[in-house]
Image (cartoon, rainbow, N blue to C red):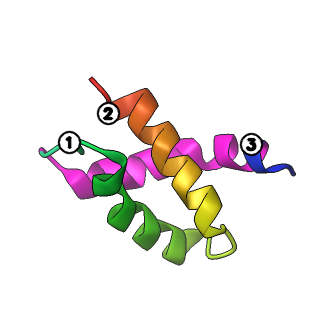
Amino acid sequence: MNRLARILAIMPEAFAAVDAALGASPAASPEALRPHLRRWRDERYPHLSDAECESLAGCLHRNFYAR
């Protein structure tokens, strides 16, 4: 599976995990998402690279949190 397909396949699960971790305080930037996303990655998808995690943080922020 290529990198983009892998990111798109796990994005819904990543969003659910990060959104639950954020609670009522939505992330203002990809940097605010990183600690929650890395924790989720380490528990669920340890094979994801740092670059893939960064891409996922950017996609989540752009599609769900940017105003």
Q: Label 3 to label 1, Cα distance in Å?
A: 25 Å
In-image side of 28 versus 4 (left or right): left
Give above or below for 47 relative to 59: below
Q: In the rendered image, which residue does mark 3 sit on? A: 4
Magenta stretch: dominant secondary structure: helix
- Side (left or right) of 47 relative to 14: right
Alpha carbon distance from label 1 to label 2: 7 Å
**Residue 10 falls within the magenta-colored stretch:** yes
Residue 26 image label: 1
Asked which secondary structure carries label 2, the reply is helix
Residue in the image at 69% along x and 74% along y: 47
Q: Amino acid at mark 3?
A: Leu
Q: Residues within 10 Å of mark 1 (few under 14, many from 20)?
A: some
Tell me where the magenta segment starts and ends, as one range: 5-24
Q: Which residue is mark 2?
A: 65
Say which label, 3 or 1, has the lower sequence index. Answer: 3
Q: What amino acid does circle 1 point to? A: Pro
Q: Which residue appears at 54% of the width and 49% of the height?
A: 56
Taking the magenta stretch, the answer to whether it contains residue 31 is: no
Quick check: marks 1 and 2 in contact, CB under 8 Å?
A: yes
